[in-house]
Every structure is written in C-alpha cells, then in structure tokens.
Amino acid sequence: MLKLCLLILLVFILFPISKGGFSISPIEEDVADYRWNLGSWEATHLWGKWIYKVKAALTFDKSNAQSDGFLVPFFDISHKIYKLEKIPEKTRVVQETSSSGSSNTSSTSQIASLHESQSKLKPLVEDYIEGIVSMVLSSYGLESRLGFLWPPVDVDFSNAPNVLVVSPRDKIERSMTLTLSPRLSPTTIDELERGLMLDHNVSALITGIGGIATYPSIVPPSQGIRRSLRSLVHEWLHQYWFFHSLGSNYWRDSNMTTLNETAASLAGDEIGDHVFQALGNNEEIMIAKHDSDPTHNNEFDFKYEMRHTRLIVEEMLSDGMVDQAETYMEDRRLIFENEGFYIRKLNQAYFAFYGSYGDNPASISPIRDEVIRYRQSFTSVGDFIREIRKFSTYEEFQQEAELEH
C-alpha cells in the first residue's frame, strides 16, 4: 500500500511543464482546444494498470510468466495500426470501394479489431517488459538505498502526445514547449503552425515524439521492440534523474536540457539494447523489427548536410536575414526529401527542438562528444548514470569531464 501511495504521488510531480511556468500566454490560449490533458490520461491509464496488477495478484494469475510469447504479436499489431491510421480518410474511402461499387472490409473496422486485439495483449506485455527492464536496471546497481528501483519501472504502450515547440523567428531558441493531443490531423497541425506564425511572429513546430516521462511513461509501440525498449529506458532515466540535481535542473538553460537529453539517449540506447538481448532467446523477437530506416541515398551524408544547414541558418539569422533563412531551410528540406530523408517542416523551431538532443544531426552542440568521453571514463553504464546525476550546471559537468581527461 505504501508503494502504491508513493506511485500516486509521482503522478503529481513527474509530468512535463513548459518552460515559462504556470501563467497562460496568448499562444497557450490559441491552442487550448488542442491541449493534451494529463489529468484525464492519468485517470484512465494509471488506475487501469493498477487494477490489472491487483486482480492478477489476487487471482494468482501466472499467465504473464510466459508473456514473452505475446511480444511479437503485440508489436506487429501496433505497427499495423500505425500504418493504417496514417492513411488519409479520403484514401481509405477509395480503397474500401471496389470498381463494382461493393465495399471491402472497412479500414475503420479493421483498425477497431486490431485495437481490440492490442488491448488484450497490452497489460501482459507491459507487465512482462517492466519486469525485464527492472531486472536489467538493478543489475547496474541503480536500486535505491532501500533496495528497490525508484521510481519503479512503469510504462504505458500507447500513442504519445504531440509536442508544440515555439522558437523566435530571429534566433534558434526553444521558448515554449506544450503537449497537444496525439490525434491531430495533418491539416489541423499545418493550420495551427501557420496561425501561430502569423498571429505571434514565431516559428512553430508540432511533432510526434518517441516517448514522454509522465508516470507511467508513455512509449508508442509502433516504433518496434528495440526502439520501444530504448525509449522506455530513456524516459525512466528522466524520472530517475528528476530526484537528483541533473534532472531537477533540466530547464535551467539550453545546455542543461541538452545534457539531460544526450545522457538519457546514450545510456538509454545502451541499456535498452541490453534488455533487447535479454529477450533474444526468442528468435522471432530478434528478427521482429519495424524500426529500419527508409531507403536513402548512401552517398548523401545527411548528418553533415543537416549540421551544415544549421550553421548557415545560424549565420543568416545573426545577420538579420530571417526571411532568407526560412527560404533557405525550405529549399534544404526539399533536397533532403529528394535524397530519401523526409522532414515535414524545417524551421527555427525544428532546430530548437531536435538540436537539444546532442546525438541528433540538427545539433551543433559539443555536448554529445563530451558525454561520450565522460561515459568512456566508467567501466559500467550504471556508474555513469549515478555520477552524472550530481551536476546542477553544465559548467560543473564540463569541469569534471575535463579533469577526467
């Protein structure tokens, strides 16, 4: 009961707060009808998970002991749902009607049936993966002094909310981050971005994300088993560091945001792959991947070209060439698309958001290389996670990272 009470407390302290506090800005008013409601989501998902856990305990349900057999079907179904829901409604109508005028099986009915199958497997898969991830995290010595992981690993495999990122037009800077509904149509997204630019003279980007450190963490299962595991550990690290200097200073400045995200990506990928290997006794799991990259021109160096684009844009904006920079970014976006790298919108907000991940091509920060060198100074990723949690400022991290070398 005590553990459950502590988990409930986490609901109220582990959630994304946009930089800028609790005051309602004109931009927040404009998107109020599209905001993602954390309270409603928690009421639906947290209690449902714990009702399942309590029922399983009371009935001594051991069905989850073999739930590794449900992993591949669950992630396959989730990927099918993702592909079907990406098809525009008009296309569905055309596909559902044959040349003779008769209707084939409705995509809507197919999606509903897949969701039903997914929902039956979901609690088993979540419970099983939470146990495996907890075991691996514990093996790295990340348990609290009381002998258990804090916070406990808890995940909800469902669609994460969209994120609205706002940047000034005359510089690349994340001035606001808000969570919006995960079910916005492409038309609505375009209209909101365009409206915010015209009404407030800002650069806006609405984009999906690979996970979010609510409690439980939200991780979209459509990205495949390996990426889902990486995302789950990534978000757990944000929760873990929240109770230490590193995470509590996430919004201190852009460097601390990048330090948090880069460290979580580096350690999350490493531990996530360890968890994936722990599932590798099942051959189907090893080959069940939906996270392969689309076809690209292998001769095109996307990382170099994107970084070069960012540097040119920075230079143009510093010279006051805002309109020219935005035209240049659109021209570059079309070049990337022609080379097989699709980006829906490339603007200042794009660079402000994705540039905060040191391992992303949109970043020009030296933090990624610094974090990699710092990680290499530790034998265990667990030691790295425990040591990096103590830094309150980027300068503190730099000083120690330099001393290590």
Image (tube, rainbow, N blue to C red):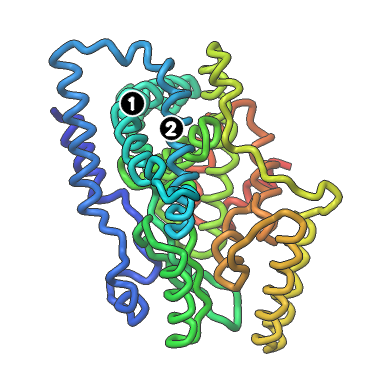
The amino acid marked with disc number 1 is Leu
Q: What element carries label 1?
A: helix
Q: Of callouts 2 and 1, which one flags the residue occurring earlier in the amino acid sequence? A: 2
Mark 1 surroundings within 10 Å by alpha-carbon count, few (fewer than 14), some (14 through 19), many (20 or more) = some
Kindly identify which numbered label has been placed on residue 121. Answer: 1
Relative to 39, 73 lies left or right? right
Q: Is mark 2 on a helix, strand or loop?
A: helix
Residue 12 is at least partly visible in this image: yes
The image shows residue 321 at horizontal and vertical percentages of 69, 87
The image shows residue 327 at horizontal and vertical percentages of 69, 80
Between marks 2 and 1 in the image, the one whose residue lies nearer the viewer:
2
Which of the image's four quarters has the C terminus? top right
- Location of residue 179 with respect to 289 vertically, above or below: below
The image shows residue 307 at horizontal and vertical percentages of 74, 62
Residue at the image point whose x is 49% and y is 36% from the top: 228
Who is closer to the viewer here, 240 or 224? 224
Residue at the image point whose x is 37% and y is 37% from the top: 157
- Location of residue 153 with respect to 187 vertically, above or below: above
For the view shown, which residue lies furthest in the front direction? Answer: 100
Residue where numbered disc 2 is placed: 77
CA gap between label 2 and label 1 equals 10 Å
**C-beta proximity under 8 Å, tags 2 and 1:** yes
Residue 245 is at least partly visible in this image: no
